[in-house]
Amino acid sequence: MSVDATDVYGSIVKIYKLLHRRLSEKMGNTSLTILDFWILKSLRDGAKPMVELANSLYVTQAAITNSVDRLEQNGFVTRSKDKRDRRINIISITGKGEEFLREIDVAYREIAIASLKELSSEDLFNLVVLLGKVLKGLSETMSNEPPSK
């Protein structure tokens, strides 16, 4: 059986799309998006500048701004200015945001556990290592590209 790089990426995209759909179903009838969920998860470790959120989640500043606006309107995050550089917006999760995240995180864990139940601990470890290599390779190809015009 022959497999090439596009087969691998095709599988990754399908996994992402299905995970996205399942999480959206679990989030219920809210105006929130999957990016909003990932922002809240990222803020669990502490407040972060919007630029850092955009970079760590591989999205544009505009996408982060739209999500943070929505999260702020729902009372899930607060926005403040950096004391040293007022141009920098610092985003923090609120108690309401943490509560929402706890609820959705339970569903996220259930989906993850159910979808990976056929893999052994060793398989899971190897999968994380291999996907880390894919991410590193993709990141390196992006950083070597000339800026788009």
Image (cartoon, rainbow, N blue to C red):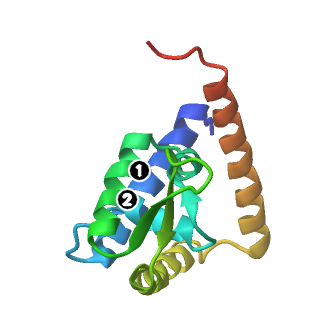
Is 52 above or below relative to 100? Answer: above
Quadrant of the rendered structure where residue 29 is? Answer: bottom left
Pinpoint residue 41: horizontal percent, then vertical percent: 53, 70
For residue 130, side relative to residue 1 (left or right): right
Q: Quadrant of the C terminus?
A: top left
Visible in this render: residue 38?
no
Which mark identifies residue 74?
A: none
Three-letter code for the amino acid on which mark 2 is drawn: Val
Give me the residue at 64% from left, 34% from top. Answer: 138
Give me the residue at 52% from left, 72% from top. Answer: 115
Q: CA distance from mark 2 to mark 1?
A: 6 Å
Q: Please name whichever residue, 84 or 103, is drawn nearer the observer in this view of the structure.
A: 84
Q: Please name whichever residue, 45 or 12, is drawn nearer the observer in this view of the structure.
A: 45
Quadrant of the rendered structure where residue 96 is? Answer: bottom left
For residue 118, side relative to residue 64 (left or right): right
Visible in this render: residue 115?
yes
Give me the residue at 53% from left, 74% from top. Answer: 112
Q: Residues within 10 Å of mark 1 (few under 14, many from 20)?
A: many
Q: Residues within 10 Å of mark 2 (few under 14, many from 20)?
A: many
Pinpoint residue 76: horizontal percent, then vertical percent: 38, 75
Location of mark 1 (residue): 64
Is 31 above or below relative to 58? Answer: below
Q: Please name whichever residue, 33 or 84, is drawn nearer the observer in this view of the structure.
A: 84
Q: Quadrant of the N terminus?
A: top right
Is 6 above or below relative to 48? Answer: above
Three-letter code for the amino acid on which mark 1 is drawn: Ile
Location of mark 2 (residue): 68
Q: Secondary structure at mark 1?
A: helix
Pinpoint residue 77: horizontal percent, then vertical percent: 41, 70
Pinpoint residue 36: horizontal percent, then vertical percent: 39, 63
Q: Are marks 2 and 1 in contact (CB under 8 Å)?
A: yes
Quadrant of the rendered structure where residue 67 is? Answer: bottom left
